[in-house]
């Protein structure tokens, strides 16, 4: 980058920091090719380099109040661009760490194992035992009996309150029985 462009960018940053919004267009015109070239050297995908340059311009405009006129503005902009490049690389790294969901069927078993069936059976027995300790009205409020609560008997708020109380009792019983 030549000295004239660097000076122009520094002056535009200073004017923008002082509140001159018209210098934003000049700054964008001056910074775009510089940022695009910087990002392109570090990122090989053109679209990603453009995204980094664009995000950098957005961050510069958003953080212009933090700009220190005593320091070089181009260095400040490069620091923001470098941060955006690191962010993009981390994002790509996280995407590579995701499992390939296209081949997920080969890792799942269509039928449960004997151990899974035993655990499920034990859980049903334990839940049945805990539900058996509830009163008939509590089981009815939870919808576990054949007799359903009729809407004409109580308001919706009363039905919700009964359910809430029944769930609270069930939680208390469960924690007493099974910790």
Image (tube, grey):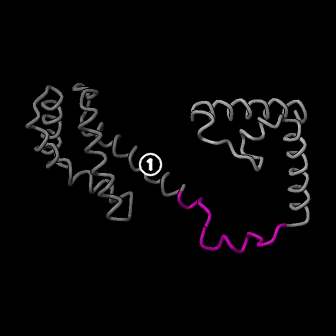
Q: Which residue is mark 1?
A: 86
Residue at the (87%, 46%) spot, across then down: 128
What x and y, as percent, mark residue 111? 81, 71
Q: Which residues are magenta?
A: 95-112
In the picture, measured across the screen, residue 106 lies left or right of residue 158, that is: right
In the picture, measured across the screen, residue 91 lies left or right of residue 12, that is: right
Q: How many marks?
A: 1
Residue at the (31%, 47%) spot, across then down: 55
What x and y, as percent, mark residue 101? 60, 68
Q: Residue 104 sits in which quadrant?
A: bottom right
Considering depth in this image, is 125 or 154 the residue closer to the camera? 154
Label 1 element class: helix
Residue at the (91%, 65%) spot, across then down: 114
**Where 84 sits versus 16, above or below?**
below
101 is within the stretch colored magenta: yes
Count residues near mark 1 (Cα–Cα under 10 Å), then give few for <14, some for 14-19, many for 20+.
few
Q: Residue furthest front?
A: 152
**Where 127 sits versus 162, above or below?**
below
Q: Quadrant of the C terminus?
A: top right
108 is within the stretch colored magenta: yes
Considering depth in this image, is 153 or 120 the residue closer to the camera? 153
Q: Residue 74 sits in which quadrant?
A: top left
What x and y, as percent, mark residue 142? 72, 41
In the picture, measured across the screen, residue 81 lies left or right of residue 65, that is: right
Q: Residue 83 sits in which quadrant?
A: top left
Residue at the (91%, 49%) spot, across then down: 125
Considering depth in this image, is 115 or 14 the residue closer to the camera? 115
């Amino acid at each position: 980058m030549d000295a004239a462009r660097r000076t122009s960018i520094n002056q535009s940053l200073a004017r923008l920091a002082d509140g001159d919004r018209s210098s934003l267009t000049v700054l964008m015109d001056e910074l775009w090719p510089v940022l695009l070239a910087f990002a392109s050297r570090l990122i090989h995908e053109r679209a990603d380099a453009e995204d980094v340059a664009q995000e950098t311009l957005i961050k510069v405009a958003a953080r212009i109040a933090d700009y220190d006129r005593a320091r070089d503005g181009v260095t400040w902009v490069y620091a923001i661009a470098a941060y955006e490049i690191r962010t993009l690389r981390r994002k790509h790294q996280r995407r590579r760490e995701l499992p390939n969901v296209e081949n997920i069927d080969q890792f799942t078993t269509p039928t449960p194992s004997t151990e899974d069936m035993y655990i499920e059976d034990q859980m049903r027995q334990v839940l049945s035992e805990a539900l058996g300790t509830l009163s008939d009205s509590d089981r009815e409020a939870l919808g576990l009996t054949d007799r359903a609560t009729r809407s004409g008997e109580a308001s919706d708020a009363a039905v919700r309150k009964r359910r809430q109380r029944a769930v609270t009792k069930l939680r208390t019983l469960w924690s007493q029985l099974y910790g």
